[in-house]
Image (cartoon, helix red, strand yellow):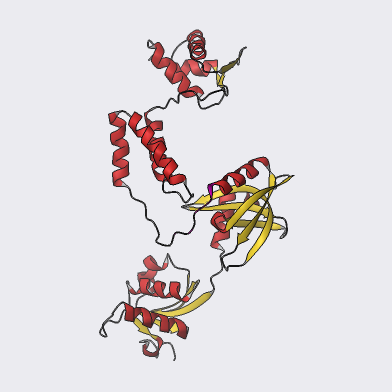
């Protein structure tokens, strides 16, 4: 590389395209050449049309300036693979319209990759698949995303209409601070002017965000971590229904399945466990009961509505009478031990 001016210039361009300031001594060490050679390579890039700013002196160095046109992008092997993989999964992001754009860009990138890199990218694509939910309704408007991102950057108030999880809609005026992603879902962390408190907004539930034309002084995010605040906020989402179950297994035997369920142990016996579970509606609770039943037989003690829902689920699953995976409160095998 030291004796190859063209290869060295490309490596120098790759470093400068990070748009950080590089001291001349740093570039000299990276390229394993003298600072005088670095100056010549910088002049070569300028001759090719790349605007490189420089400062002189003991701590002088170079920075790639913003030019009037987009120069060719130089990527090393790992960067090229990262871009191709990123575009592939951007095509599955929950942003309306980005799929086609990402696939077009991916096609252009992959046609330029040398064979060895195309094989690496192909191996990743063929070995990894993404789970897609049948009820994905969390598509984000890219224009709304752009408006909110700019408002976060420029500290500008935003107005938008918002629909809560319970269906109630309202007009909001907020101080947007940070966008946070969680899987395919996007959130806005903002200070709500009318509520006088921090709020987390799902982007797929807000529409027509508009810049209000006024600016605000950024506030300190609680805990100093936007992602942590959103995580705790989502974790605090209230569960609207409780249910009590009797399970024919020790609590230790149930740890593997209960770790994914919002639960509280109520009574633990030598061969059974009574557990309270929480969910958003009867349907989700019924599916939770079915999930536990894969580990051990379950009895629905209360509420009666859940027992009826589980019974209906069992009918639709065509569970034969000898199967005891799902039983109901009227036939609870632990009634005497539970004092009923």
Quarter of the figure that contains the N terminus: top left
**Residue 139, horizontal then vertical, whole percent:** 49, 54
* Residue at 35% across, 70% down: 253
Q: Residue 161 lies in what quarter of the image?
A: bottom right
Q: Can residue 240 be seen in this view?
A: yes
* Residue at 69% across, 45% down: 156
In this rendered view, identify the residue nearer to me: 178 or 87: 87
Quarter of the figure that contains the C terminus: bottom left
In this rendered view, identify the residue nearer to me: 40 or 248: 40
Q: Can residue 271 be seen in this view?
A: no
Image position of 80 with respect to 123: above or below? above
In this rendered view, identify the residue nearer to me: 75 or 228: 75
**Residue 237, horizontal then vertical, whole percent:** 56, 65
How would you classify the magenta stretch by its main secondary structure?
loop
**Residue 43, horizontal then vertical, whole percent:** 51, 10
* Residue at 59% across, 54% down: 229
Magenta stretch, residue numbers:
136-142
**Residue 246, horizontal then vertical, whole percent:** 40, 80
Asked whether, in this view, residue 4 is left or right of residue 212, the answer is: left
Q: Is residue 43 magenta?
A: no
Count of numbered badges drawn on the protein: 0
In this rendered view, identify the residue nearer to me: 157 or 333: 157
Image position of 163 with respect to 28: above or below? below
Asked whether, in this view, residue 88 is left or right of residue 70, the answer is: left
Image position of 184 with respect to 102: above or below? below
Image position of 260 with respect to 336: above or below? above
């Amino acid at each position: 590389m030291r004796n190859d001016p063209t290869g060295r210039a490309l490596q120098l361009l790759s470093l400068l395209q990070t748009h950080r300031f590089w001291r001349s001594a740093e570039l000299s060490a990276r390229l394993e050449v003298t600072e005088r050679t670095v100056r010549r390579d910088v002049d070569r890039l300028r001759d090719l049309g790349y605007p490189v700013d420089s400062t002189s002196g003991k701590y002088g160095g170079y920075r790639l300036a913003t030019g009037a046109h987009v120069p060719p992008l130089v990527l090393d092997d790992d960067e090229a693979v990262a871009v191709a993989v990123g575009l592939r999964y951007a095509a599955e992001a929950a942003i309306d319209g980005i799929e086609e754009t990402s696939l077009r860009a991916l096609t252009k990138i992959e046609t330029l990759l040398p064979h060895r890199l195309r094989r690496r990218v192909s191996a990743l694509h063929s070995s990894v698949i993404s789970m897609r939910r049948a009820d994905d309704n969390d598509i984000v408007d890219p224009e709304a995303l752009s408006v909110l991102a700019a408002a976060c950057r420029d500290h500008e108030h935003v107005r938008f209409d918002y629909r809560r999880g319970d269906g109630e809609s309202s007009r909001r005026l907020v101080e947007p601070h940070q966008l946070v992603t969680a899987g395919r879902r996007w959130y806005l962390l903002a200070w709500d002017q009318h509520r006088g408190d921090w709020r987390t907004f799902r982007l797929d539930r807000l529409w027509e965000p508009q810049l209000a034309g006024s600016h605000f002084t950024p506030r300190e995010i609680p805990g100093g971590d936007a992602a942590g605040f959103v995580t705790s906020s989502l974790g605090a989402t209230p569960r609207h229904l409780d249910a009590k179950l009797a399970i024919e297994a020790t609590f230790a035997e149930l740890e593997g399945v209960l770790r994914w369920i919002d639960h509280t142990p109520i009574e633990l016996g030598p061969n059974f466990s009574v557990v309270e579970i929480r969910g958003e509606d009867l349907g989700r609770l019924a599916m939770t009961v079915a999930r536990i039943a894969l580990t051990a037989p379950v009895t629905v003690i209360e509420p009666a509505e859940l027992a009826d829902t589980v019974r209906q689920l069992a009918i639709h699953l065509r569970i034969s009478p000898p199967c005891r995976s799902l039983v109901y409160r009227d036939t609870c095998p632990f009634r005497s031990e539970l004092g009923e």
